[in-house]
Image (cartoon, coloured by chain):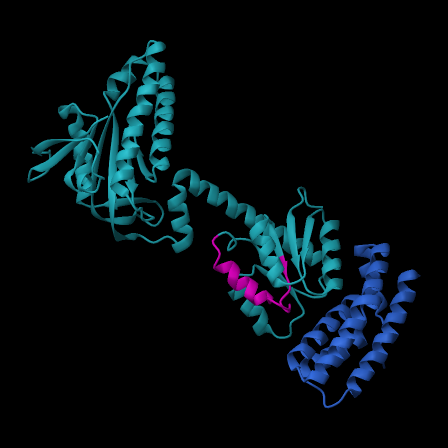
Chain colours: A blue, B cyan
């Protein structure tokens, strides 16, 4: 069984403690500024062969994914964080697809 | 809600984490400042005053580990509570944070209930620590308090070269008989305030107050470039201050105060003596006894400030001294060369 893109309980709790309006802004910050940067950093780090930068960017993305309850995205990021530099960017394409799914779901949830 | 909002610093390179943590803390009633990496955080900590730091570990420019290392080495920052917030993998990282002085560790995403509890607990610990520091400051001296903080408490001492001063009110018994105990307490408080000002102003440390007398040290716990000159300068100012006080006392129809000051210089052991539960910072050595004897001898000599030959030798030329010759002091086997400082 695959888990939901966004864990509804985690997201509801986030809204509860930080406030719905604030979470809406937070999702926008993540979706429009931070996530694209982290993805770009992962691709750059891989191209440059920098394992440390790669690990750090994956770590950062994992941390945000967990905050929003995006558990599959968090799990993918964690695998990248701990796995060292991948041989090619196939895992990054999979990550990007999951990220796009998560962002779509987050935007829908935060406006709902 | 915290009854009184604290000022907190959040250091995290990840904007989403930073904003969210900042928001959670504001909801708890705290004031929050933010830093996007360790270097900026450290700069802010050194420039402004904070009650607590929430520190991420993985940061560019300067990591959380480096921030912790720098804080331990910084006298002013080492007591600031730090809660590490991180999603680092592995218990070894957490252990290292705690070893480096972090008070607590909160895994990300930060649970708001845990956050509140840990922040309150850390702030309470800081409040107790501040209170304790304040107590030590009041009952010791800031120098001894800092020395204690820096090197911890241990009985025993180290050998130093310094100058010791004893000061005592002459004829204190007849003064106490001539006035009420309340007036005597007030007089003592005024006396101590004036003497402390003169002594600490010249770089000395008052380390004992006994009845109407006090002992102070120049050159310990911290070394002093011109211990002899500083002690004599303090002594002169003490006499001047007492004369000013006497003008006031005599205008009010009260007896004038007279003090005697003895100063000696030499090698001594400075440190804590007593027991582990009650100890005092003091100096032990020949110069200490000699200073006390010289102070006692001021009455017979009819001079308010007496110093020994080593102190006299340590003074700049041009100081107005009067050699009183070799004197047989009470409790001393050999005679001692005594000098009077003109006032």
Stretch in magenta: B54-75
Q: Is residue B73 magenta?
A: yes
> Picture coordinates of residue B286 (x, y %)?
17, 44
B257 in magenta? no
Front-most of A74 and B225? B225
Q: Residue at x 33, y 35 (%)?
A: B199
Q: Is residue B308 above or below residue A37?
A: above
Q: Residue at x 58, y 53 (%)?
A: B45
B175 above or below B3?
above
Residue B211 at least partly seen: no
Residue A75 position (above or below residue B196) = below
Position of residue A78 in the picture relative to residue B296 (left or right): right
Is A78 on the left-hand or right-hand side of A23?
left
Report the front residue among A65 and B155: A65
Q: Residue at x 84, y 59 (%)?
A: A25
Instruction: Answer left or right for A103 relative to B235.
Output: right
What is the quadrant of the C terminus of chain B in the image?
top left
Instruction: Return the x and y of residue B269 as percentages of the image width and height.
Output: 24, 50
Q: Quadrant of residue A43?
A: bottom right
């Amino acid at each position: 069984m695959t888990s939901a893109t966004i864990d509804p309980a985690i997201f509801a709790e986030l809204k509860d403690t930080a406030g719905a309006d604030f979470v809406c802004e937070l999702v926008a910050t993540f979706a429009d500024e931070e996530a694209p940067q982290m993805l770009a950093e992962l691709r750059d780090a891989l191209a440059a062969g920098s394992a440390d930068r790669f690990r750090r960017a994956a770590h950062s993305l994992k941390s945000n994914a967990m905050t929003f309850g995006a558990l599959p995205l968090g799990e993918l990021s964690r695998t990248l964080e701990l796995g060292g530099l991948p041989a090619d960017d196939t895992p990054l394409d999979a990550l990007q697809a999951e990220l796009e799914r998560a962002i779509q779901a987050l935007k829908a949830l935060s406006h709902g | 809600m915290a009854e009184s909002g604290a000022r907190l610093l959040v250091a995290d390179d990840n904007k989403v984490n930073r904003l969210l943590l900042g928001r959670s803390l504001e909801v708890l009633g705290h004031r929050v400042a933010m830093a996007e990496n360790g270097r900026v955080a450290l700069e802010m900590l050194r420039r402004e005053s904070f009650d607590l730091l929430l520190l991420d570990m993985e940061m560019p420019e300067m990591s959380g580990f480096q921030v912790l290392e720098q804080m331990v080495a910084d006298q002013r920052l080492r007591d600031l509570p730090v809660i590490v917030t991180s999603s680092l993998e592995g218990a070894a990282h957490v252990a290292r944070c705690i070893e480096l002085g972090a008070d607590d560790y909160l895994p990300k995403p930060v649970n708001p209930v845990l956050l509140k509890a840990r922040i309150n607990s850390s702030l309470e610990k800081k409040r107790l620590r501040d209170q304790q520091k304040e107590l030590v400051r009041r009952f010791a001296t800031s120098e001894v308090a800092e020395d204690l903080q820096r090197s911890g408490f241990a009985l025993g001492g180290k050998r130093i070269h310094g100058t010791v001063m004893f000061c005592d009110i002459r004829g204190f018994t007849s003064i106490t008989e001539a006035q009420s105990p309340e007036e005597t307490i007030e007089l003592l408080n005024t006396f101590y305030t004036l003497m402390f000002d003169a002594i600490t102003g010249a770089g000395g440390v008052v380390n004992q107050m006994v009845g109407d007398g006090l002992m102070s040290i120049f050159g310990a716990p911290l070394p002093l470039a011109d211990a002899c000159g500083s002690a004599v300068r303090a002594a002169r100012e003490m006499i001047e201050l007492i004369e000013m006080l006497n003008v006031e006392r005599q205008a009010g129809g009260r007896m004038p105060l007279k003090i005697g000051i003895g100063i000696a210089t030499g090698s001594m052991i400075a440190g804590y003596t007593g027991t582990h539960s009650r100890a005092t910072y003091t100096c032990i050595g020949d110069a200490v006894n000699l200073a006390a004897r010289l102070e006692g001898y001021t009455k017979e000599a009819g001079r308010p400030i007496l110093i020994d030959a080593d102190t006299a030798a340590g003074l700049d030329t041009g100081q107005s001294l009067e050699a009183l010759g070799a004197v047989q002091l009470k409790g001393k086997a050999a005679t001692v060369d005594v000098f009077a400082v003109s006032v």
